[in-house]
């Protein structure tokens, strides 16, 4: 009977692990990737140890933005009110839970970026998936 209970426990653990692997993968170089239902992929490259922003907090982020072909379309530092719609939705959602000193890679689908319009006259075409490396510098 004890053997049956242990076996059932192992099967339950295997089911939980296999279900989790559908949305979470791990690579040695980039950390753990979480894929949200809306298609946003979040990879923690480095865990921060500082404060985590709350909605409305003014934050400072360093970023590099690329297209899927590797072309950098923008980079620099930016200050904005967190989770207040001042940046694309992929950023507001992708920075949640991040701590100062942390670094993340975000793979943002068009629906959470610039959509079918892209940036008119700018470097981002319509329906572009965006790749960002972001570092949370301050809250």
Image (cartoon, rainbow, N blue to C red):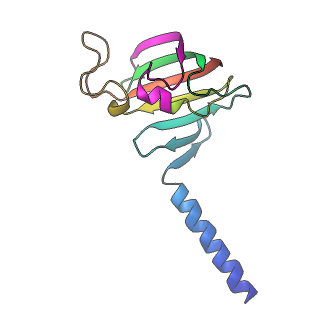
Question: Number of numbered discs present?
Answer: 0
Where is residue 22? Give x, y as percent.
48, 54
Q: At 39% from the left edge and 26% from the top edge, which residue is drawn?
A: 130
Q: At 59% from the left edge and 67% from the top edge, which residue is drawn?
A: 14
| Quadrant position of residue 97 | top right
| Quadrant position of residue 101 | top right
Q: At 53% from the left edge and 54% from the top edge, which residue is drawn?
A: 21
Instruction: Residue at the far bottom: name it.
Output: 1
Magenta stretch contains residue 79: yes
Instruction: Please say if 104 is above or below 137.
Output: below
Q: At 51% from the left edge and 26% from the top edge, which residue is drawn?
A: 83
Instruction: Please say if 4 is above or below 36.
Output: below
Where is residue 80? Give x, y as percent.
52, 15
Magenta stretch contains residue 128: no
Of residue 7 and residue 83, the one placed in the foreground of this image is 83
Quadrant including the N terminus: bottom right
Range of the magenta residues? 71-93
**Residue 39 in the figure: left or right of residue 78:** left
Of residue 26 and residue 34, the one placed in the foreground of this image is 34
**Residue 22 in the figure: left or right of residue 3:** left
Quadrant including the C terminus: top right
Where is residue 36? Give x, y as percent.
46, 43
| Quadrant position of residue 12 | bottom right
């Amino acid at each position: 009977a004890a053997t049956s209970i242990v076996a059932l426990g192992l099967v339950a653990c295997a089911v939980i692990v296999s279900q989790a692997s559908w949305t979470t993968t791990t690579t040695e170089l980039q950390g753990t990737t979480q894929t949200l239902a809306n298609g946003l992929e979040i990879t923690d490259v480095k865990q921060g140890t500082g404060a985590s922003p709350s909605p409305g907090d003014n934050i400072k982020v360093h970023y590099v933005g690329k297209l899927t072909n590797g072309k950098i379309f923008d980079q620099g530092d930016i200050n904005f009110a967190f989770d207040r719609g001042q940046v694309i939705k992929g950023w507001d959602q992708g920075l949640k839970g991040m701590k100062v000193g942390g670094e993340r890679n975000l793979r943002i689908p068009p629906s959470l970026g610039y959509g079918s319009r892209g940036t008119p006259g700018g470097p981002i075409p319509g329906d572009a998936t965006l790749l960002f490396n972001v570092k949370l510098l301050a809250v």
